[in-house]
Image (tube, rainbow, N blue to C red):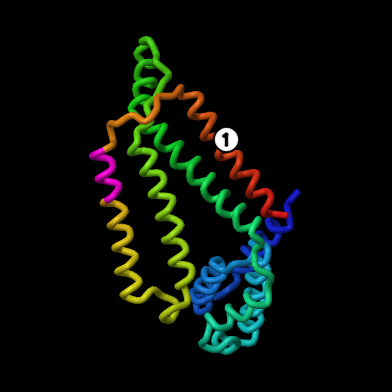
Amino acid sequence: MRSKLEELRRLNNILDEQINEDNQPIFTDMICYIRSADISELNQEMVRRDLSEMILSAQSRGDSIRDVIGEDFKGFCDEVISNLPPKTTKEKWIDRLDIVCFCVSILGGINIVFSQGFLKIISNIISKQAINYNIDISVGTMISIVVIIALSFLIVNRITKNALDQGGTLNMKEKVMAAMAVGTALTVLIIISLKFGRQTLVSVNIFLAIAVIGGFYAAHKVLSGIKKY
């Protein structure tokens, strides 16, 4: 049985497909901006539905989104958002924990699959040699995961909050800042890999590592489920 949020999201996807090419770019930017608002996902989807229906109604009359809203798209979104209740402290922490758990499960899984220990286990299984099921987790790996998650938060927050600035696109200053942030992060990751890449933080059984990663993913699913109702 679908939750109210899932059902609303499904219906919104159907409505979005009916928005024409002229209205789609600014509509996408408006939804992106609304995603950065301090309101629940359910309220975000309700705003998305109302906006979709407004645009489709205008299209049926031969009007564009600008004919209905005007040119101040950000002001329009801010007014809509201001009339909705903000997220509670509990909802904010659930959102953050959900994202962290999901990112850790994905990045952790990738690091396990491409680790030397895992590749050696596979090699030994194929060659039928004695198998050591322990894998090493380096300091560099742990720091890299933290840096990537932090950078993801910053970039997504920056892009969504500025989606409607300068006519719906990032200006040159924003592009330079984004490029600098990515460049700095990559430089830090390279330095970390060179300096700490071979320094083992802990050696663990691969099945325990998989269980921990699975635990983070399970936590993500539970937290996501809480937000859907």
Label 1: which residue?
215
Residue depicted at x 32% and y 74% = 173
Instruction: Count residues near mark 1 (Cα–Cα under 10 Å), then give few for <14, some for 14-19, many for 20+.
Output: some
Q: How far from the left and from the top, in percent, is residue 202? A: 39, 27
Residue at the image position 48 percent from the left and 42 percent from the top: 104
Which quadrant holds residue 43?
A: bottom right
Residue 20: in magenta span: no
Indicate the quadrant where residue 142 lies.
top left
Instruction: Assign the magenta stretch its main secondary structure.
Output: helix
Q: Nearer the viewer, residue 153 or 168?
A: 153
Q: Can you say whether 99 is above or below 207 in the image?
A: below
Closest to the observer, 195 or 44: 195
Residue located at (36% from left, 38% from top): 141
Asked if residue 192 is positioned above or below residue 181 in the image, the reply reads above
Position of residue 126 measured from the top left corner of the image (x, y, whole percent): 37, 16
- Residue extending farthest right: 1
The front one of 204 and 13 is 204
Quarter of the image for residue 31 reads bottom right
> How many numbered dots are placed on residues in this image?
1
**Considering the image in quadrants, where does the C terminus appear?**
bottom right
Q: Is residue 72 above or below residue 171?
A: below
Q: Is residue 2 left or right of residue 137?
A: right
Report the amino acid beneath label 1: Gly
**Residue 159 percent across, percent down from the top left:** 44, 67
> Of helix, strand and loop, which one carries label 1?
helix
Inspect the magenta stretch and tell me whether residue 191 lies in it: yes
Picture coordinates of residue 148, whole percent (x, y): 39, 49
Q: Tell me which residue sits at (60%, 41%) in the image.
A: 219
- The residues colored magenta run 188-195
